[in-house]
Image: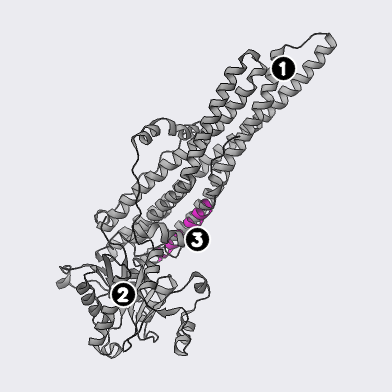
Amino acid sequence: MSAIQLQVAFAGHNREPDLGDLAELRMRVAEGFAMLTGAGLAPARLLTGLAHGADRVAVQAWNEAGLGQVHAVFPFLPTASARTDPADLSATWLDGARTEDGGRSAHLAQSRWILAQADLLVVVWSGERARGAGGTADTVRLAITAGLPVIWITPGSVEIRLVRATPEALQEFDFAEWLDGLRDGHPAMIEPATAEGLRAIFARTGAQPLTFKGESRLARWLHLWLWRTYPLFQRVTGGRAAPPPPQEEIPPDLADQPGFKTLTAAYQASDLRATRLSAVHRSEQILLLGAAVFAAAVGSAPSVWPMMKLPIVLLELGLALAAFAVWWTAAHARRHERWTDERRLAEQIRLERAAWALGLSTRGAGSPATRDEHQRLGRPILRQASPPAGVMDAERMGRWTVWATREVIGGQIAYHRQQAARNGRIAHRIGLAENAAFGLLVLALAGFALADVIAHRTGTALPTWFGGLVLMASVVMPAVGAAALALEAKLEFGEQAERSHAVATRLQKILHRLTATQDIDAARGAIGSAFGWVLTEADQWREGAGRRRLFRGG
């Protein structure tokens, strides 16, 4: 991965009357970037429209400060004489003519594309309303509603201000009302920009990329046999998994994008770690509950074999110590939380990989807790990916949109249908095991009572071993029932089956709407809706993290 730690968007006026004295503006922009450096900004990336005016001033100041790379996003496709990227920066050209043919603003689409990749916005803005869609004021509006901090430089003023909206303030935020407050001298959510304040923001953005420890040789060895317990349990109780759907072919020009390669490698690594942690945690739960049932059988065995008490006691003691060691190490490592975080991170990167290809972001999707999690887990990796570069014409965006649709919607429909079917079977068979244990217990107790009555009437005595077996059944069968209840409570097979069925149904409706339109922008909107549904399901799964602590089994 590259050393990019933050991605900074820039926007500003391009008309000379709005900029004031250019020499003074250059000083203010340089001061703003120096403030970022003083706050701890390491090598970063500047995202800009590179229009005449403030954008060119910002690029010059950025390069002079040595802050890092520059990536330009142009609203219209290049002419035949300008199709070569400038030598000193990467660039993206959007199909603004197609956007305008659809009744939308090319410059507003440009602003959305820039802000989708950004961690904060630096803006040269007079504070006035936009003269038309896609102006500087609209960029500020989009940034605030996305929860991005805004460093505001006002032409003709020496003051540099910080616009920062809390999640609570955004609940009732209205941009027109906020502009009226600025005009009337009641500037909500605004404070003087300082290096200290920015440093606090950087700390909350998770500016440092996450690091992960590699697996030890022992861990890899255990994955070959002991941590295969849960997959074996799945196969026995849920049947063989249906073959996965064929992988959607990634368009070659998308697969060759450096940013896409970065996100793909991060997703594959995170998905592997989540799968490993899942196998360990779930296998430990199966082993602990199996040990609890086995310990119940061993502990009650002296009722049948009285002479074996000491060996049986020693065996049960060993089982208890081994079970406690498994539980304690898992609890100490907080593996259930690590598994939850890693699975959520993998899901975020998978969705963001599709969003990245379309100039979207999952930043605003899901609940407030999901958005906070996105900032904490996903952003440190996402900012490592350089934006899509090249000409984003209708042909290319059409192919990328088809891939993203199949990746986010089609792939999730197939996955959740498979999960709904398999987890439903497991939940059903666990219920059967619980009912069978109860039935066998009732049968054993009733059989003993009947045999005892017959023995008294015939004047015979029941064998000692017969009573011992009934006693064992009265201990082991409730343990089996308790283990079945614990499995369902901890691993939530029935609940997961219901959630997966609901998500697959909702995504199928979105897919039906998509197949009825060939409009790329409409498809991007539908994919954005799919993000919300997938993340809502993921929210419910994450909320069960506390319930996934290992059940010690007595």
Identify residue type, mark 1: Gly
Would you place residue 431 above or below residue 545 in this image? Answer: above
Residue corresponding to mark 2: 35
Determine the image quadrant of residue 16: bottom left
Residue 369's mark? 3
Disc 1 from disc 3: Cα separation: 56 Å
- Could you tell me which secondary element the residue under label 1 belongs to? helix
- Between the C-alphas of marks 1 and 2, the distance is 82 Å
349 to 430, vertically: above or below: below
Q: Which residue is mark 1?
A: 467
Residue 438 in the image, given as x and y percentages of width and height? 68, 30
Q: Around disc 2, counting alpha carbons within 10 Å, would you say few (fewer than 14), some (14 to 19), or many (20 or more)? A: some
Q: Is residue 537 magenta?
A: yes
| Helix, strand or loop for disc 2 | helix
Residue 14: x percent and y percent?
A: 27, 83
**Circles 1 and 2 in contact, beta carbons < 8 Å:** no
Report the span colored magenta. Answer: 522-541
Dot in front, 2 or 3: 2
Q: Quadrant of residue 117?
A: bottom left
Separation (CA) of disc 2 from disc 3: 30 Å
Residue 450 shows up from this direction: yes
**Residue at horizontal 28 percent and vertical 82 percent from the top:** 28
Q: Quadrant of the C terminus?
A: top right
Which tag, 1 or 3, sits closer to the chain's start?
A: 3
Q: Tell me the kind of residue under disc 3.
A: Ala
